[in-house]
Image (tube, rainbow, N blue to C red):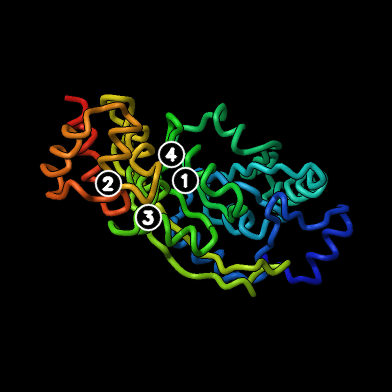
Amino acid sequence: MRLTPTILRSLCSKYDLTPSKKYGQNYLIQDWPVEKMIEAARINKNDTVIEVGPGFGVLTFALVERAGKVIAFEIERKLEEYWKEKIEDQKNRRSEDHSNIEIIWGNALKELLSYKVKSYKVVANVPYQITSELLRTLLELENKPESITIMVQKEVAERICAKPGEMSMLAVSVQYYGEPKIVDIVTKGNFWPEPKVDSAILNIELAKPRPNPPLGRGGNFFKVVKAGFAQKRKQLHHNLSRGLQIDDLKIKNILIEVCGNEKVRAEELSVSEWKKIVEKLSM
């Protein structure tokens, strides 16, 4: 279902909506990014899909044609009547008394913590401002998704997919749980209202079995990594020694053993090297 700017203006007027910067409401007006996302997520009739921020459903309606069920989390209550009508229309077209669309009203960042579904994939056009928090929420859930395919700000996608030398806390966090890759770039002209920056389709295939953070001295994996990135201009041994209250010489010896360089900085390490450091700190 393609929504042109004219149709979107009409819908916004009907439902008393002004595209919100707060909620990151930039609507897709082209079909090809939707197809790319569904293709990257490898959606089929056996899949349950969780979507965050369905809006007027340009992605949702494409998903329901391919998936077994779509569960969409929407925070904008003004769209309740819109979705009630659309779900009734879908039931009538299917000649069934049920729909394979379920709308959960509320903040997805909170609702996901208590919503239970056995096996699922995440596909969503994500508001820029909640990208990091949404990823952290999904990746730390006890029941993690099989994969995450989302539209995010291009620069954020590039940060997430960074290699050693340009790593960040965000990159380490995502790459600990799975393998991220940029599927395609979606320029700002594909949205209405047009955002200030380009977007990217990001696909994250989660590792099997789903990993949980290992415990190490001074806290868990992410506490160690957070300490390492605390002061970007400082060498890693300084940050870890200060942040974890561990003898600096011990840290230097571990760094030499793991990567051959006691003067290494946090952004230079791979996820596997971080894991080795955490393991040695726990000994």
Q: Does residue 261 appear anywhere in the picture? A: yes
- Whether pointer 2 and pointer 3 mark residues with C-beta atoms closer than 8 Å, the reply is no
Identify which residue is drawn at 86% across, 53% down: 15
Element assignment for label 4:
helix
Residue marked by disc 4:
139
- Viewer-nearest of discs 4 and 2: 2
The residue drawn where x is 82% and y is 45% is: 78
* 182 or 271, nearer to the observer: 271
Q: Give how far apart the Cα atoms at labels 1 and 3 are.
A: 14 Å
Mark 1 or 3, nearer chain start: 1
Q: Which residue is mark 2?
A: 271
Q: Nearer the viewer, mark 4 or mark 1?
A: 4
How far apart in space, not on screen, are marks 4 and 3 (Cα)? 13 Å
Q: Residue at x 28, y 56 (%)?
A: 164
Q: Distance from label 4 to label 1 (Cα)?
A: 12 Å
Q: Quadrant of the C terminus?
A: top left
Residues at badges 1 and 2 in contact (C-beta under 8 Å)?
Answer: no
- Residue labelled with disc 1: 121
- Residue 160 in the image: x percent, y percent? 41, 55
CB-based contact (under 8 Å), mark 4 and mark 3: no
Q: Is residue 212 visible?
A: no
Residue 69 left/right relative to 169: right
Depth-wise, is mark 1 or mark 3 nearer the camera?
3
Q: Amino acid at mark 1?
A: Lys
Q: Quadrant of the N terminus?
A: bottom right
**Label 1: which secondary element:** strand
Residue designated by label 3 = 180
Of labels 4 and 1, earlier in sequence is 1
